[in-house]
Structure formats: C-alpha cells, structure tokens
Amino acid sequence: KSDMPSGGRRRNKQEKPENTTMEVEASNGEPNGGAPAEAGAKGPEVHPETATAKDYYFDSYAHFGIHEEMLKDEQRTKGYRDAIINNPHIFRDKLVLDVGCGTGILSMFAAKAGAKHVYGIECSGIIHTAQQIIKDNKLSDKITLIHGKVEDVTLPVPKVDIIISEWMGYALLYESMLDTVLAARDMWLNPGGIILPDKATLYMCGIEDTQYKDEKIHFWDDVYGFDMSCIKKIAISEPLVDTVNPDQICTKPCQLLSLDIHTCTKADLTFTSQWKLQASRNDYLTAMVLYFDVGFTRIHKPLWISTGPRAPYTHWRQTVFYLHEQLTVGKDETVEGSLTCKPNPNNHRDLDFEISYKFEGKASGVQEAKHSYRMR
C-alpha cells in the first residue's frame, strides 16, 4: 500500500448545514471583495479568515486545505484545464454554469477560454475566498458567484450553453453531487447545450491484499491481549479509500456502470449490476476494488481522466471492499456476482453497497456469500 492517507471522506460541495440562515452580501458588503455573489441565496456563512473548528465540522469545503489537495491533483486539474482552455471554439461567447465552483478555478478557465459570462454556484464558505481570487485575477466582469444550493438559487439568466462541474466522489457517486448537476441541467441547460465531463464509467477488479487486510481488519481480534473483534465487524463493512498497488491486481476488470450525463436521470444512480471477474493468475482474492473514468467527449479531441490503479495518482484513489473470506482463484477461473449501490435512507450523501458472489474453484470448491457495506 502507498503511504498516502487512507479512509478519508469528502463532504458534498453543495451540502448545506442545518440552522444556517445568513445570506451572502453582494460584493460591496463583502469584506473579502471580489466578484459579486448574488443576494437572496441562502447558504452557510463561514468565512475562512474567522472560521473555527466548529464551523469546519459542518462546512469542510470552507477550508482552503481540501481545495489545495484537489488543485494539486494534476490529473484532475490539468484534465479540466485542457478540456476547457484547448477548446475556445466551444466556449467563445457562451454562457457557462460552474456547479460547485469551489475556488473558482474552472470558472476562470472558462473565462480565459472566451466565455461570454460564467456563473459559479457554491454552497460552502470558500465562496468568500473565491470572490477575492476572481477580483485579484481581474475577472470580476466575466464571472458572477452565487452562494447557495443549486436547488434553491435563481440564475440571472434563463438558460446557459455549457455546464462544467467536478462532481465526482469516491467510487464515483459518493456525496451524491451528481444529483445536483442533473438538477442544474434540467433547469438551465439550453437544448443542444453541453456538459463537461459528459461521460462516466465505473469499473471493478479483484486484488490480493492479505497483509493489509490483516493490519486493518484482523488487527481487532487481539489488541494487546484483548478481544476487540466487535470493531472488526464495523471495519470490514466500511470500504477503504486508498491507493492500490497495481501489482496486487489478480483479475481482469469489468464494467459496472456507464453514464451519459446529458441523458441519465437520478434514478440511474441507484443500480444493480451483474459482474464477472476472470482471474489473471493463481492468487488469493481478498478484496474488490472500484474505480472510475470520466470523459470529455464533446470537445475537439476527446479527453479522459482515469482513477484506476494503473493510472497516475489522483486524490480519489480507489475504493476497496474487503471480502469476509478470501477466494483461492486459479488462472482463468471466474467469480460471478452482483453489486447494488444506493443512497443510504438516513443520509443520502452516504452510499450503501451490497456485493454478492458465487465461485466454484478447483482449489476450494463452491463458495458463495453476500456482504453489505456502507460508505460514510
């Protein structure tokens, strides 16, 4: 395993804490200055310069640190930059909407690509810093920021020509931010308009990860002579976000889900997929790994960002689901099963997974099981 931090979780960029009623003032009343934030859109009032730990507990996206991690993810940020900046013929004189604009980086790329005007919507307190960033880069006449949830705000224009958004979460759908992009699409995208990225594909592969499973899961069986195995039951039910060494991969990948962001619906984000993994060598299958690709296919030269184990590192890393019992697989043998993914009924930002499988191997005979996981 990499020494990258593991188990982290990104909160939703559009999530609004309860009991927050303050409105964002227009730029003439905003101490940080910057591009105007439309009045009347309610959202959490967290100012990075004065925020406390209590504020960040409810509004993690107000802190610059999480944006630093994303901006330094070169595969992510350069991918978006190239898709936008290298296609000025698509952006020239167009109205653009940036959903979950954060620091405003995508909005500024769009402005530099020749957009007529860019509207950025952001629910977290980072919008106050984004206003200053846009002012400092002399783009206040090209970019308008709006503080609030997409579902609650009003755009100054009836329709836009392009929607850009970095909505992807761990295992693609964690945080449910794609729901927000689809809502924006249905409300504001012109017929014939485009969304970037416009394609998303979710994949699964199998890995041998016995040593790390012992460290993270079986560790609880004997902790300095004490039985803490009750924690083990919780630990194995929570997927682990981490960097997978490609040498650990012991199966061929299979596709679980393919989305066209122009046409998919919220219902498509709750799914059950039948899968089949073929072993690429003799090994012990201890975990399933989910990863995704997103594509910008409506631009002049299509571009894809991959988060797979064999691709360059991204802050999304991969999502690991440990099996309760390892499978002894022989080269070319297949494991078949199904995977169900749906929002948790108590918190739709969380994801519930169910993975079932059946395997008949030469070494171990018939094995089948069904496991439930919760990503939170």
Image (spheres, rainbow, N blue to C red):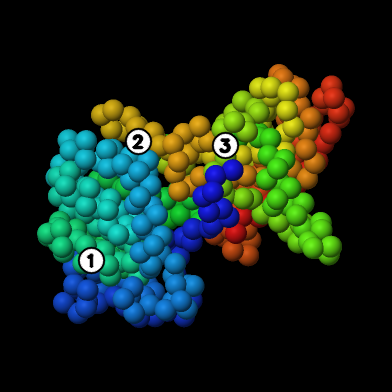
> Label 2 belongs to which residue?
296
> What is the x, y in percent for residue 105?
27, 53
> Label 1 belongs to which residue?
131
Q: Closest to the observer: 263 or 275?
A: 275
Q: Residue at x 27, y 38 (%)?
A: 82
Q: Can residue 200 be seen here?
A: no
Quarter of the figure with the N terminus: top right
Q: Closest to the observer: 193 or 360?
A: 360
Q: Residue at x 35, y 64 (%)?
A: 64
Q: Secondary structure at mark 2?
A: strand
- Asked where in the image residue 334 lies, by quadrant, the reply is top right
Determine crowd level at label 1: few under 14, some 14-19, many 20+ residues with C-alpha closer than 10 A: many
Instruction: Estimate the spatial distance between the alpha carbons at disc 2 and disc 3, rounded to whole Å.
Output: 27 Å
Q: Secondary structure at mark 3?
A: loop
**In the rendered image of this protein, does residue 28 appear above or below residue 366?**
below
Outermost residue toward the right in this view: 365
Nearer the observer, disc 1 or disc 3? 3
> What is the x, y in percent for residue 88?
17, 38
> What is the x, y in percent for residue 87?
21, 36
